[in-house]
Image (cartoon, rainbow, N blue to C red):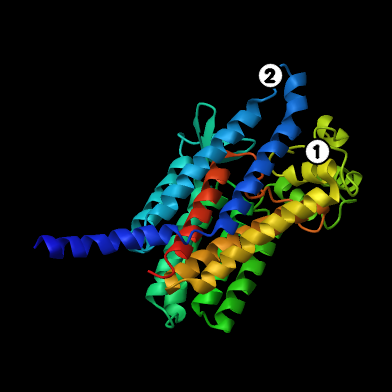
Amino acid sequence: MATASATSVFPLRRGATAAWRHVDLALLFSSVAIAGMGVLMVFSATESKLREQGFDPHMYLKRQSVWVVLGLAVMVVMFSVDYRVLRDIAPFIFAGAFFLLVLVLSPIGSSTRGAQAWFQFGSFQLEPSEWAKLALIICVSAYCATHRGDLDGRRLLTVIGLAAVPMALIYLQPDLGTDLVFGAILIGVLVVAGARPRHIAAICLVAIVGMLAVVQLGVLKQYQVDRLTAFANPTNDPQHSAYNLAQAKAAIGSGGLFGKGLFKGTQTNLSFVPEQQTDFIFTVVGEELGFVGAFTLLALFAVVVWRTWRTATLARDLFGTLLCVGILAMFVFQIFENVGMTMGIMPITGIPLPFMSYGGSSTVANFAAVGLVLNVHMRRFA
């Protein structure tokens, strides 16, 4: 009996140990490198302004460093437990995300600059929509994997319904940018899951018509419409919504090849670019580190994208593949939109740059997403 028992236990231990040997170091190190660069850029964007206002110039540096450390801890937790467990508890994950999104719209939620999207706990803000992205990826991936090769019209409507519920709640905050990320995730997962091309085309057409209707029918507030349209026609800007764009382009353009040097950016130090530590963090990189620094950052993002796609192709099951594809769609859309809006080729939507923009919820959720990809990669032989 003892021999049989030992034989049944030790292979599990050897399997767990073997999984740890398959950690994707390229993905891990590139994510950590971007986050480290983000901490430095957040410090550079805020140090001068905080000093002038009489606050601790290291305040944002300390906070962002804490978020990165916490994110690393969450990432370890996310790749320590077999990702297939998430498939079994997907309904509970969706229910939890739904509950938080409803709760944040209640008097318990905090309102900042016209948006009610956070829970305030002292100096820490919890933004449920960042975690709802991961919840959507897990739930849609689990449903599509269950109905592999059989995504007919009825099941496709079920998937759309899964996405529509949190998207509607997020729109009420209002946060149109995050809804666009949800749309990118949904399309990415459905394409790989085997949805029919005509269904994908219909979804895209409905989404385009819906966005045009939202802009034209007065559903959005005027300042939101101005932000979305300023990049296309900056001269027609009665609300001065193109100011951020003009200053962002000036900051990036002034950096040249090698930049002005860390902490030496005039646009940054004089606070010409609003929200520079959050939505416009890429302008700090462009001004102070120049083309070389911006290229290095984008190269690190390219490694994250490549390794995530590679893991999707190596995954042992469809659920693992769809998890990685959903995370890939989330990262690619956010990177392209955020960098694009600082250069005037995309509308200003307030989408943060992954691992770079200041913010606890975004940083920790991004590390959790990388943890899921590492999880799939580690267990591709299991």
In the picture, measured across the screen, residue 193 lies left or right of residue 146, that is right
Residue carrying label 1 = 273
Q: Is residue 375 left or right of residue 39?
A: left
Q: Is residue 381 left or right of residue 5?
A: right
Horizontally, is 368 left or right of 276 in the view?
left
Q: Secondary structure at mark 2?
A: loop
Residue 108: name its quadrant: top left
Q: Position of residue 340 (x, y in %)?
A: 77, 56
Q: Residue sitting at 11 percent across and 60 percent down?
A: 2
**Residues under numbered marks 1 and 2 in contact, where contact means CB atoms less than 8 Å apart:** no
Residue at 70 percent across and 44 percent down: it is 279
Q: Residue 112: horizontal and vertical position, in percent?
A: 61, 34
Between 328 and 94, which is closer to the camera in this rendering? 328
Q: Is residue 24 above or below residue 63?
A: below
The quarter of the rendered structure image containing the N terminus is: bottom left
> Looking at the figure, which quarter contains the C terminus?
bottom left
Q: Which residue is mark 2?
A: 55
Residue 227 visible? The answer is yes
Point out the residue furthest to the top here.
54
Task: Say which amino acid is labelled 1.
Answer: Val
The residue furthest front is 3
